[in-house]
């Protein structure tokens, strides 16, 4: 069970010991943010090293990388890191050294995009069932996976996790949220299979459960394993809170160390857009915290919630109430250069989100992703953030990058 040390008056500054024995020096986590900074061989670059050096010097207890793909054919972005074989391990050493400085944990988020692989990566994506993601014409119709392909995916998650451990990452996070492949299996909207990987939640969860079982066996009992899971997909007929609770009970039995709660998919990006949240949730600042409370009441799993945390006082409050154990922040790291260093200085701290004047409603989340992608790339070059960056430029820049790096 997670244990807590109450040595200071700030709950955010307290360390946390995970079930595997690893200790996180405080409660602040940089949640995964895709960096799109790999080279043409999908390996780590100097820029990634610089970026993680910056982040490990600013005081977060845990940094979780953006998607590291288990299969280069099904990336989420053209310049994703991919870790499929031994050759790529050494290329990660400088980035890992930089990200683990100052007693910071650096965990690799491993992922398979399935049908959320854009056309810049593949015109032949795979998925549990042949159901296309319809968004901005960016995704081709997937082929339903054969049993051989499912077995291959399980092998790949295991192999990539072992290679991450070899590369020096201090933990693993399996991405089972936000509509990526594992989430596609979990959701009845995208999984219409009639074999043992489809139908009941027991079957839909089989891919995730098999992967976690294999990871625990191969990585050992003292290596942190985390899962990022949706509380729900927020789509009618999709993966819902009852499904999530079923999966969480199994994950607890399998001995994971941290459950990160998020929600939504590319079709309904609730993990990004607070506008769609209920008024009560908006008032409470964080998006998925009510569900986290329910899990806390029913399990002993350490819980991290990501999405919407912006004020120091609210963070301290929910930690004090033991509504969760770790707080995930993504955009605050890109809206304030020295986050969380300054955030921890006073009790009134609040991080402001960037505001956009962007008129094309259907592309707003894409513009926002492009805006933050640009900020990540500035930090990776050692430059300061540019809060007034034009979101229309961001769309053009990100599309051009995806196209050039994906197709040429
Ligand atoms: C630029 C950017 C890239 C992201 N990439 C990932 C990713 O690779 N994996 C993931 O699980 N979530 C990703 N997310 C989602 C964040 O981890 C987080 O769930 C979301 O931004 C809500 O947290 P926030 O309100 O603190 O930003 C990304 C978010 C941003 C802004």
Image (cartoon, rainbow, N blue to C red):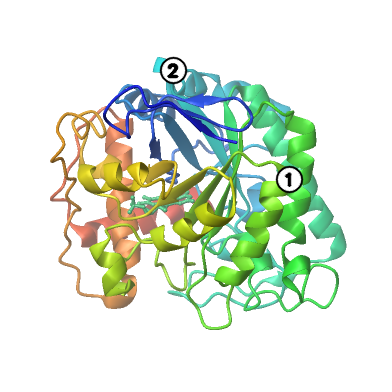
Q: Quadrant of residue 268?
A: bottom left
Q: Which numbered tag is attached to residue 310?
A: none
Classify the position of the N terminus by image quarter: top right
Residue 346 is situated, as x and y percent measured from the top left of the image, at 14, 32
Q: Which residue is mark 1?
A: 254
**Residue bearing mark 2:** 103
Residue 186 rendering spot, x and y as whole percentages: 66, 67
Q: CA distance from mark 1 to mark 2?
A: 27 Å
Q: Nearer the viewer, residue 35 or 5?
A: 5
Q: Quadrant of residue 50?
A: top left
Q: Quick check: can you spot residue 125?
A: no
Q: Is residue 140 left or right of residue 56?
A: right
Looking at the picture, tell me which residue is in the foreground, 43 or 336: 336
Q: Is residue 242 above or below residue 117?
A: below
Residue 348: image x %, image y %? 13, 41
Q: Nearer the viewer, residue 298 or 18?
A: 298
> Residue shown at 68%/66% (left/top)?
185
Q: Is residue 146 left or right of residue 267?
A: right
């Amino acid at each position: 069970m997670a244990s807590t040390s109450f040595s200071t008056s700030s709950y955010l500054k307290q360390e946390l010991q995970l079930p595997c024995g690893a200790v996180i020096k405080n409660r602040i986590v940089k949640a995964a943010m895709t960096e799109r900074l790999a080279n043409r061989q999908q390996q780590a670059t100097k820029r990634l090293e610089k970026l993680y050096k910056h982040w490990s010097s600013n005081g977060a207890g845990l940094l979780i990388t953006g998607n590291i793909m288990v299969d280069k054919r099904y990336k989420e972005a053209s310049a994703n890191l991919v870790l499929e074989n031994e050759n790529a391990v050494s290329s990660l050493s400088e980035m890992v050294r930089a990200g683990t400085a100052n007693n910071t944990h650096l965990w690799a988020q491993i992922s398979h995009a399935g049908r959320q692989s854009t056309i810049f990566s593949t015109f032949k994506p795979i998925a549990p069932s042949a159901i296309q993601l319809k968004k901005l014409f960016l995704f081709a119709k997937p082929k339903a996976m054969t049993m051989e392909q499912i077995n291959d995916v399980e092998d790949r998650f295991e192999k990539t996790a072992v290679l991450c451990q070899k590369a020096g990452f201090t933990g693993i996070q399996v991405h089972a949220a936000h509509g990526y492949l594992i989430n596609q299996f979990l959701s009845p909207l995208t999984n219409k299979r009639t074999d043992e990987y489809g139908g009941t939640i027991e079957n839909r969860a089989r891919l995730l459960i098999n992967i976690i079982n294999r990871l625990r066996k191969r990585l050992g009992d003292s290596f942190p394993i985390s899962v990022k899971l949706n509380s729900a997909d927020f789509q009618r007929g999709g993966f819902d809170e009852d499904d999530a609770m079923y999966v969480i009970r199994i994950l607890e039995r399998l001995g994971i160390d941290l459950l990160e709660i998020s929600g939504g998919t590319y079709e309904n990006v609730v993990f990004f857009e607070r506008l769609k949240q209920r008024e009560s949730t908006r008032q409470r600042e964080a998006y998925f915290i009510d569900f986290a409370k329910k899990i806390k009441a029913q399990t002993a799993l350490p819980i991290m919630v990501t999405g919407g945390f912006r004020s120091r006082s609210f963070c301290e409050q929910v930690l004090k109430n033991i509504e969760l154990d770790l707080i995930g922040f993504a955009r605050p790291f890109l809206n304030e250069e020295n986050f969380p260093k300054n955030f921890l200085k006073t009790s009134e701290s609040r991080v402001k989100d960037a505001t956009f004047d962007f008129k094309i409603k259907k592309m707003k989340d894409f513009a926002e992703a492009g805006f933050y992608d640009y900020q990540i790339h500035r930090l990776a070059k050692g430059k300061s953030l540019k809060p007034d960056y034009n979101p229309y430029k961001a769309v053009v820049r990100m599309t051009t990058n995806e196209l050039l790096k994906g197709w040429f």
